[in-house]
């Protein structure tokens, strides 16, 4: 038995309370099989936390997170919060900033048995998570958005060499474990100084990885290339907003937003979080696809296992991925995939697949 890790469980809003428990249940099954020990700690966040603690991210939740090895965060739905709670940075943005979770790793891979538009897609968007165009989190205090008069709105973007160096290193290190190809995203013909700095610092970082193939594209051109020839891309490194948009596109090309996982990582801690949002249109109906949350939790276990050189966590993560692949390949799925199973039943199918695997 490896050491016991402590992971937080934050259900969040919308479909969060439906998909997060499924992810924890599937992870628990995989961890038991691999002989790995994880203690799960439920913590309030989002609308439920506003109702119970008066804040979407209570101080007690934050203090508890500071003691943990990582956590699983469900989606948040700011628009469901009372107006006075909507103006503060949302829980996910706050946590990324507070814990300096500078790298948002978002794989997009087509699974056999799903209706992927791009059957050959197998790429990872590595998104800088702390600055760039997202003005709600790129300042030390306040936000980078201003409204000098009711009819004028402005925003400030921030690009810094140290943050770009960190995300570039993450992208190249990841590429070296994959097909050794890094694509840098920018718009340096228009946003010359800001996204130009992003491109140039990423290119400088490439010097330490002579075996890597490096290219760069304007964001708009890359969007077209991703649709036309998705199989040609491996690791795509982007600033905050470009990475957010491209990973939604890549996730949908891979079959469904409901399949797109991610983690947000610093050098010390990581947070599992599906790429999709709270999906209020289907919340409470028991039909949401938990796959993205399951795969995000697997990514967290894999990240933790590699950080602590603990093979049992890496094995548990791989078991979860095989279960998803195996079940989807049988044509079993939730409604977004054209299937008939509800959220919980799909989770049970994954658990059953792991039990039956020899
Ligand atoms: P955000 O800005 O937080 O990303 P959003 O409103 O842009 O949120 P989502 O909440 O991700 O977008 O929802 C987009 C669409 O995808 C919705 O129609 C939603 O029902 C669907 N969707 C998202 N996640 C899932 C899921 N896990 N299972 C099934 N459908 C989903």
Image (cartoon, grey):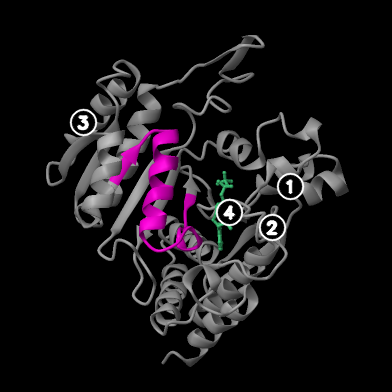
Q: Earlier in the sequence, mark 2 or mark 4?
A: 2
Q: Nearer the viewer, mark 1 or mark 4?
A: 1
The answer to whether any part of residue 63 appears in the image is no
Alpha-carbon distance for marks 3 and 2?
A: 39 Å
Secondary structure of the residue carrying tag 1 is: loop
Is label 1 in contact with label 2 (beta carbons under 8 Å)? yes
Q: For mark 3, what is the residue? A: 203
Q: Residue at x 26, y 40 (%)?
A: 222
- Residue 173 position, x and y percent, is 28, 47
Distance from the alpha carbon under mark 1 to that under mark 3: 39 Å
Q: Is residue 350 visible?
A: yes
> Which of the 4 quarters of the picture holds residue 8?
bottom right
Q: Which residue has dot 2 on it?
A: 11
Circle nearer the viewer, 2 or 4: 2
Q: Nearer the viewer, residue 104 or 41?
A: 104
| Residue 151 in magenta stretch | no
Separation of disc 1 and disc 2 at Cα?
8 Å
Q: Judging from the image, what secondary structure is the residue with disc 2 in? A: loop
Q: CA distance from mark 1 to mark 4?
A: 21 Å
Is 229 situated above or below 340?
Answer: above
In the picture provided, is 270 more to the left or to the right than 326? right
Q: Which residue is more in the foreground, 272 or 112?
A: 112
Label 4, ligand 1: CB separation under 8 Å = no
């Amino acid at each position: 038995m490896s050491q016991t890790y402590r992971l937080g469980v934050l259900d969040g809003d919308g479909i969060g309370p439906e998909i997060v428990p499924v992810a924890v249940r599937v992870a628990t099954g995989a961890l038991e099989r691999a002989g790995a020990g994880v203690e799960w700690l439920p913590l309030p966040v989002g609308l439920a936390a506003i109702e119970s603690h008066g804040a979407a991210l209570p101080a007690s939740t934050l203090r508890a997170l500071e003691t943990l090895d990582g956590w699983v965060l469900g989606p948040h739905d700011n628009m469901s919060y009372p107006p006075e709670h909507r103006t503060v940075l949302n829980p996910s943005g706050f946590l990324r900033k507070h814990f300096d979770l500078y790298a948002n790793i978002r794989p997009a891979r087509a699974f056999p048995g799903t209706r992927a538009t791009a059957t050959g897609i197998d790429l990872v968007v590595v998104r800088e998570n702390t600055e760039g165009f997202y003005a709600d989190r790129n300042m030390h205090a306040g936000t980078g958005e201003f409204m000098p008069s009711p009819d004028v709105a402005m925003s400030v973007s921030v690009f810094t060499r140290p943050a770009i160096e960190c995300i570039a290193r993450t992208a190249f290190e990841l590429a070296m474990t994959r097909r050794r190809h890094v694509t840098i995203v920018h718009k340096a013909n228009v946003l010359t100084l800001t996204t130009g700095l992003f491109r140039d610092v990423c290119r400088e970082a490439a010097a330490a990885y002579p075996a890597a193939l490096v290219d760069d594209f304007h964001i708009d051109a890359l969007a077209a290339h991703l649709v036309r020839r998705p199989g040609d891309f491996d690791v795509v490194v982007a600033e905050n907003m470009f990475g957010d948009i491209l990973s939604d596109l890549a996730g949908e090309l891979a079959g469904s937003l409901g399949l797109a996982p991610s983690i947000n990582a610093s050098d010390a801690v990581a947070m599992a979080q599906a790429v999709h949002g709270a999906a209020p249109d289907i919340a409470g109906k028991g039909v949401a696809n938990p796959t993205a949350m399951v795969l995000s939790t697997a990514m967290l276990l894999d990240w933790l296992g590699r950080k602590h050189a603990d093979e049992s966590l890496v094995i548990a993560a791989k078991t979860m991925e095989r279960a998803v692949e195996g079940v989807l390949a049988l044509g079993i799925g939730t409604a977004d995939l054209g299937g008939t199973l509800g959220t919980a039943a799909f989770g049970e199918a994954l658990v059953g697949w792991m039990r039956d695997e020899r």
